[in-house]
Image (tube, coloured by chain):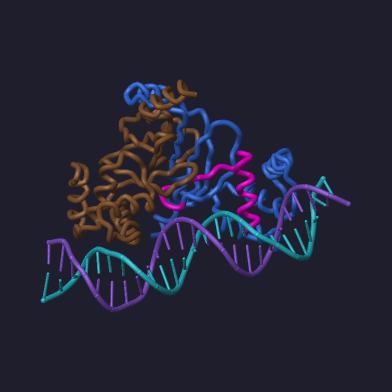
Chain colours: A blue, B brown, C purple, D cyan
DNA sequence: GTACTTGCAAATAATTTGCAAATAT
DNA sequence: ATATTTGCAAATTATTTGCAAGTAC
């Protein structure tokens, strides 16, 4: 039961010279199948359902490998800042639902005007930017409406 | 030896109903006097120079109070994501030097066009954004130039 | 067959908590 | 005077590592 994204992760893993074990496949599939950010413990719990013999250590090790390969990104939030989400290639940013933790990646932010202005004002040579947005996803907005009708 | 910023932090602390102890004053002054992001251990080390009897526990507790008051912000980076920096009021962002960790806050980012476009495309109700930039500060640029001449 | 990968248990690191003594207001 | 705050030591939590046994290629 591998999604397209799972197959792609497996490809990247092997391309990086790593072996595709049952345990790693479970971790890959969990990440690929989830549209939410997941922390190592959550990945572990979900992976265990598919592959009961997987260990937490392997989850940590596999996440690290995927991170180094650039196949997943770390998602930092004001509170928990140790969760991971699938990374598409290129320069992307995240839009995260603060209610259900689902993550949408987006690209094509145009910050060049803002960045140029800042460079001029501060003298910094700006090398990287990192934009993260949070809000309420469409599904949660619907659920909140239903909820408020019940109350 | 309190800076203006230190006095302001002390004011916020007392306004929040907290007592100003010698230990807390040391933590406040360290944060106020630093233009870099600092993690709890760094705050502890520096505070101990001023007030040797301060404990690491108190540093953690004081940072948490200041955070809840909004007097400091957490600065997250791809790696270490547990450092703190002085927060001015209002909506601000950080520009962080990747070489010396110095931090410049800025406001007046205009992302409304980007955010409106994303709202339309995704259906998310965007409630918060968080932009962090990294690069090389002017002082480090100068040092790097000097360094390259020596090499 | 061999080098990589595994899970476990133990080690390490980071953070929090209970509590009696100290202290700011 | 009194409620808050302290440092310490212990507890908790998160993450990493050493290693012998197992496995993908």
Q: Is residue A138 visible?
A: no
Magenta run includes residue B146: no
Magenta run includes residue A79: yes
Residue B141 x, y percent position in the rendering = 40, 25
Count the labels in the image: 0
Left/right of residue A109 with respect to residue B65 in the rendered view: right
Residue C17 x, y percent position in the rendering = 38, 69
Residue A35 x, y percent position in the rendering = 57, 46
- Image quadrant in which you'd find residue A149: bottom left
Task: Choose between B125 and B74: the one closer to the eye.
Answer: B74
In the image, is residue A44 above or below residue A133? below
Left/right of residue B108 with respect to residue A101 in the rendered view: left
Task: Choose between A46 and B69: the one closer to the eye.
Answer: B69
Q: Which residues are magenta?
A: A57-80
Q: Is residue B111 visible?
A: yes
- Image quadrant in which you'd find residue B126: top left
- Single out the residue that lies furthest toward the front: B150
- Image quadrant in which you'd find residue A111: top left
Residue A40 x, y percent position in the rendering = 57, 55
Task: Choose between A18 and A35: the one closer to the eye.
Answer: A18
Left/right of residue A132 with respect to residue B21 in the rendered view: right
User: Residue sitting at 63 percent across and 55 percent down?
Assistant: A59
User: Residue sitting at 50 percent across and 24 percent down?
Assistant: B151
User: Residue sitting at 65 percent across and 50 percent down?
Assistant: A62
User: Residue sitting at 60 percent across and 43 percent down?
Assistant: A67
Left/right of residue B119 with respect to residue B67 in the rendered view: right
């Amino acid at each position: 039961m591998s999604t397209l994204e799972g197959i792609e992760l497996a490809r990247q893993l092997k391309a990086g010279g790593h072996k595709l074990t049952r345990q790693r496949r479970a971790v890959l599939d969990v990440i690929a199948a989830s549209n939410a950010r997941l922390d190592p413990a959550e990945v572990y719990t979900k992976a265990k359902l598919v592959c009961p013999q997987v260990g937490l250590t392997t989850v940590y090790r596999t996440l690290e490998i995927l991170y180094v390969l650039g196949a997943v990104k770390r998602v930092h939030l004001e509170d928990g800042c140790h969760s991971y989400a699938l990374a598409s290639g290129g320069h992307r940013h995240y839009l995260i639902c603060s209610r259900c933790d689902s993550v949408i990646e987006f690209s094509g932010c145009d910050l060049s005007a803002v960045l140029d202005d800042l460079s001029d004002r501060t003298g910094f040579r700006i090398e990287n930017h990192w934009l993260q947005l949070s809000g309420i996803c469409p599904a949660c907005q619907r659920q909140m409406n239903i909820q408020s009708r019940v109350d």
